[in-house]
Image: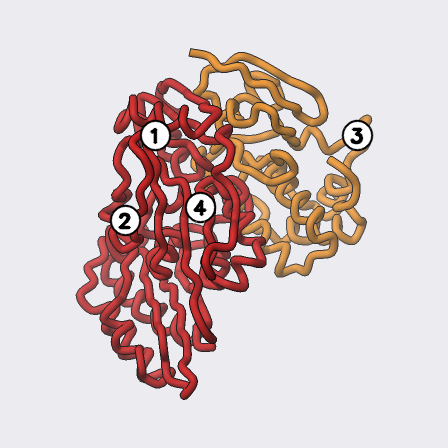
Amino acid sequence: MKPPVFEYHAPESLEEALALRAEHGEDSAVLAGGQSLMPLLNLRMAFPGHLIDLGRVPGLAGIREDDGGVAIGAMTRQRAVERSELVRSRLPLVSRALAHVGHPAIRNRGTVGGSVAHADPAAELPAVALALDATIVARSARGERTIDAGDFFQGFLTTALEPDELLTELRLPGLPGRFGAAFVEVARRHGDFALAGAGAVLALADDGSIGDARLVLIGVGGTPLRAREAEAILRSARPEQAVFAEAAERAAAGLEPGSDAHASGAYRRRVAAVLARRALAEATP
Amino acid sequence: MSVEVRLTVNGAERSAAVDPRRTLADFLREDLGLTGTHVSCEHGVCGSCTVLVDGASARSCLMLAAQASGCEVTTIEGLARNGALHPLQEAFRDAHAFQCGFCTPGFAMTALELLREVPRPSEAEVREAIGGNLCRCTGYESIVRGILLAAERGAGGGGS
């Protein structure tokens, strides 16, 4: 099908874009890379009265070192992040996760900010932001604020962004010491939406026990899920299969994923536990 | 409402005023008459609409024509020069890498991007790169062979 009627705006400055957001609010949709919004428009699942194309707003793309971590501008193409040596060395979880995001053509256009703001529960980048305790920078005509990733994802395709706000930057803190990262998922075809997936980061202390541990699940609820109880089991434990299995079981316990044409909730819950265990094993440095 | 779209397609400057809803895929086909780019799923999963935008593969069904203003777009029609097939097209022909041909332009543009970045890819790298393109006819084996043959023949060299 073809997109429904909308009024198209191509602001050439952030101020102009924010003024449009302030004016049109919930009746506006933001066009970043278009890899999530355009399918919604083409399938007529969204009917924004106004489309704000950020493609001509300067200053929103870029990858920079930020206090030991990495800050990524909202309009940075996923492909640029995939190729970034800075990201690969400091935040390998991001690089591993991006390998699962769609296909090269999708990553050439798709943006980091767009993926995080769209907040599909089966998407990889929102989960990575959650796992790494990212900070989201939001701008509006009213000013700028920062939002912790833990508070950002509120429900299915729903974030803490106000209707007059734009996500302008994603700040990902670095991880200290020796750590490994892994991202595993199950999909009908590599690059399709995940039926279930898990991202993990494991840091080892000097004595070889687990120091910091991060575990996040996708495709198992309305938002990406940080498995904090599982992380508590992992911290200070030995990096062994039995520990990973226990943590994975805890991560999956209580999950009530929805069923749809692609997979049942029971399947997603069971697969999530297996993937959590595999991700932890693979993330062991 | 209408927007002015001004871009370069296969080396030629093209422009038109279109409905802002017009996707790049439909712009190429309907407004510019370049029907080699095909439209199928219209939500980015089949790859039949794949073109190169500033040298990078893109789903033209997921771009508004307006977004492509100022860009250099390459479609399947841009591969042959003065009636001579591009080495990639010759390799596809020689390897019987298509049957009905519907998916073929999308595969060709995807393969062209791959070969320009990785002139001698492994079979695994080829399969990975074309993972986002669907074919209902061939079962993919002949397409993989065609791309590997193109690589052997140096199809990744040269400009757009």
Drawn side of residue A52 relative to residue B99, left or right: left
The Cα atoms of the two marked residues, 3 and 4, are separated by 38 Å
Secondary structure category for the residue under label 3:
loop
Residue at position x 31%, y 65% from top? A272
**Which residue, given by chain and number where applicable, does mark 3 sit on?**
B81
Please state which amino acid type lies under the numbered disc 1: Ala
The Cα atoms of the two marked residues, 2 and 3, are separated by 52 Å
Give coordinates of residue A229: x percent, y percent.
23, 71
Secondary structure category for the residue under label 1:
strand
**Which residue, given by chain and number where applicable, does mark 2 sit on?**
A152
The Cα atoms of the two marked residues, 4 and 1, are separated by 16 Å
**Which residue, given by chain and number where applicable, does mark 1 sit on?**
A29
Please state which amino acid type lies under the numbered disc 4: Val
Q: Chain A: what color?
A: red
Query: Residue A207, relative to residue A218: is it above or below?
Result: below
Residue A112, which numbered label?
4
Q: Chain B: what color?
A: orange
The answer to whether dots 2 and 4 both sit on one chain is: yes
Front residue of this view, candidates A149 and A109: A149
Front residue of this view, candidates B68 and A165: A165
Please state which amino acid type lies under the numbered disc 3: Arg
Q: Chain of mark 2?
A: A
Q: Chain of mark 3?
A: B
The answer to whether dots 3 and 4 both sit on one chain is: no
Query: How many other residues sit within 10 Å of disc 1, few (<14), some (14-19) or many (≥20)?
Result: many
